[in-house]
Image (cartoon, grey):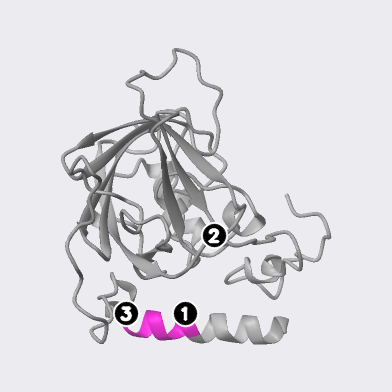
Amino acid sequence: MKLVVFTLTVVLTTLLLADPAAAQGRPRNPNLPPPGPVPRSAEGRALLSVSATPADKGVWTPLFGVTEPIAPLDQIPFQPWARALYDARQVHELEPHTRCKASGTARQFQTPYGVEFVEAPELQRLFIFDIGGPHTFRTVYMDGRSHPAEIEPSYYGHAIGWWEGDTLVIDSTGFNESFWLDRRGLPHTTAMHTIERFTRKDSETVAYEITVHDRGAYTGDWTGGFNLQLDRGVELFEYSCQQANYAVELMVGGERSSVDRSSPIVP
């Protein structure tokens, strides 16, 4: 089984590297019916749930390739150390997400299993449930509060949100440095502050945009993003990341044959 997983990984990576276009944002399947209008609440606001009908099920998955960062590299103003770390991560893919750690900001939306947005107006909160990886959730406070003066750094940070028309805006700070910003390894520091925007474009699409403010890792602000597509009929399901996790054998790149990853203890 492990050999099959490794072989499929190598084949997929080879195909994507051979065809740069395949690594860009994927178009929606043309065989699907045309998208419908944006579903709305009784008050007329766009919904990030499947529809206004609770019985309708679905999760949001990325329309995005796995070999590119969330913004073109030539548009990301790296600090020298941050670019060196990003380059090193292309060889040694020791991503915390593959070791069952939570991933904040854009990386949360880049799992193949999807996420679900759950609004709890009675609590004045919104929750983003993550199926893949650690199977955790992010809490977004929608009650108009500000960030506290002192924040214990965490994977998801402290998030406050509000609506601007059909766009959900999430302002987050207070991150730890124990996750990657995206699947390719963009780094950050505890000084990072992000603004994420989720815009429901139609019944099947959400446009995701993130602006990163982090002078510890970058010389200026930068923006990236991609689209999410609705995977209808899928519900949150149990995902045991720790059980039979063989990913440690796939994490080492160019020096795979000479680096010992046989330790039973995975940090």
Image-based side of 210 in relation to 106, left or right:
left
Distance Cα–Cα, label 1 vs label 2: 28 Å
Q: Residue at x 41, y 29 (%)?
A: 173
Chief secondary structure of the magenta span?
A: helix
Q: Residue extending furthest right?
A: 264
**Mark 3 crowdedness (10 Å alpha carbons): few <14, some 14-19, many ≥20:** some
Q: Where 227 sits versus 18, above or below? A: above
Q: Would residue 223 appear left or right of 80 to someone viewing this image? A: left
- Judge by depth and name the residue closer to the eye, 19 or 136: 136
Residue 75 at x, y percent in the picture: 22, 52
Residue at 33% in and 74% down:
23
Q: Which residue is at a point 65% across and 54% down the rendered structure image?
A: 100
- Disc 3 marks which amino acid? Ala
Q: Which mark's residue is nearer the viewer, 2 or 3?
A: 2
Do labels 1 and 3 touch, CB within 8 Å?
no
Q: Mark on residue 236?
A: 2
Using the image, tell me which numbered label, if any, was put on residue 13: 1
- Asked whether residue 227 is drawn in magenta, I would say no
Is 167 above or below relative to 69?
above
Q: Secondary structure at mark 3?
A: helix
Number of the label disc, if any, that sits on residue 22? 3
Q: Earlier in the sequence, mark 2 or mark 3?
A: 3
Q: Which circle's residue, 1 or 2, is located before the other in the chain?
A: 1
Instruction: Locate the N terminus and report the quarter of the image it occupies.
Output: bottom right
Displayed quadrant of residue 124: top left
**Three-letter code for the amino acid on which mark 2 is drawn:** Leu
Q: Work out whether mark 1 precedes mark 3 in sequence or the reverse, and give the earlier one.
A: 1
Q: Please provide the residue range marked out in magenta.
A: 12-19
Pinpoint residue 65: horizontal percent, then vertical percent: 36, 70
Seen at 60% across and 53% down, the residue is 135
